[in-house]
Image (spheres, rainbow, N blue to C red):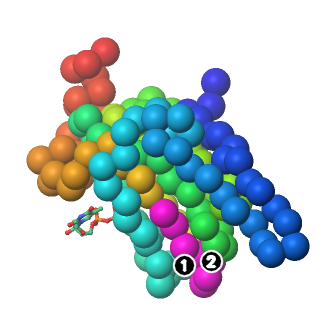
Amino acid sequence: MSLFEINNLKQLRDERGVLTILESEKDCPFSIERVYFLSNLKVDLPRGFHAHYKLWQYTLCLQGSFEMIYDDGVRREALTLDSSSKGVLIPPMIWHEMCKFSSDCLIMVVASDHYDEEDYIRNYDEFKRKVKSDS
Ligand code: TYD
């Protein structure tokens, strides 16, 4: 089974354009407490490189494309996000990296809680140790 859980958001298309809907606790399985955007990204400057102890996140590529890498401490998988209607869940304890951003890439992330640096694991060896001790 893939590490990625992807779901399709409802889109309403007509001659005026496309309306995409993301509902809290419905399309993403948590209550949304924070939203942030990543823009002006550089193809050769990957980001992320962390996991969260408790935070749930859900991300969408609103424009352009990028590659998401997931690592659960055992398996490592990559997925290209290139659609504004496809949301990807980032559960706790998934090491994630983002790279290969197109020049027009715009990423939106919704999160289950406010920003808390204490919830981050930014060291990969520490992440692996935590996975091992939890198993
Ligand atoms: P960072 O975790 O390095 O971003 P990425 O995961 O995209 O690589 O975050 C960059 C800085 O922004 C870091 O100092 C933490 C801060 N930050 C906030 O203050 N609030 C937030 O909601 C987020 C996501 C980051």
- What amino acid type should be assigned to the residue bearing mark 2? Ser
Q: In the image, residue 121 lies at what x, y percent?
A: 22, 46
Spatial CA distance of label 2 from label 1 is 6 Å
Give the residue drawn at x 85%, y 66%. Answer: 14
Q: In the image, residue 45 lies at what x, y percent?
A: 44, 76
Whether 2 is drawn above or below 21: the answer is: above
Give the residue drawn at x 87%, y 73%. Answer: 15
Whether 25 is drawn above or below 45: the answer is: above
Element type at mark 1: loop
- In the image, is 47 to the left or to the right of 107? left
- What amino acid type should be assigned to the residue bearing mark 1? Val
Give the residue drawn at x 48%, y 63%. Answer: 108
Comparing 1 with 20, the one in front is 20
Q: In the image, residue 115 lies at what x, y percent?
A: 21, 55
- In the image, is 36 to the left or to the right of 67? left
Contact, CB < 8 Å: mark 2 with mark 1? Answer: yes
Disc 2: which residue: 102
10 Å crowding of disc 1: few (<14), some (14-19), many (20+): some
Element type at mark 2: loop
Write down the region rendered in magenta: 102-108
| N-terminal label among 2 and 1 | 1
Comparing 105 with 70, the one in front is 105
Image quadrant holding the N terminus, namely top right
Q: Nearer the viewer, mark 2 or mark 1?
A: 2
Q: In the image, residue 6 lies at what x, y percent?
A: 63, 40
Residue positioned most to the top: 135
User: Which image quadrant shows ligand 1?
Assistant: bottom left
Q: Is residue 51 visible from the viewing direction of this image? A: no
Whether 48 is drawn above or below 89: the answer is: below
Disc 1: which residue: 43
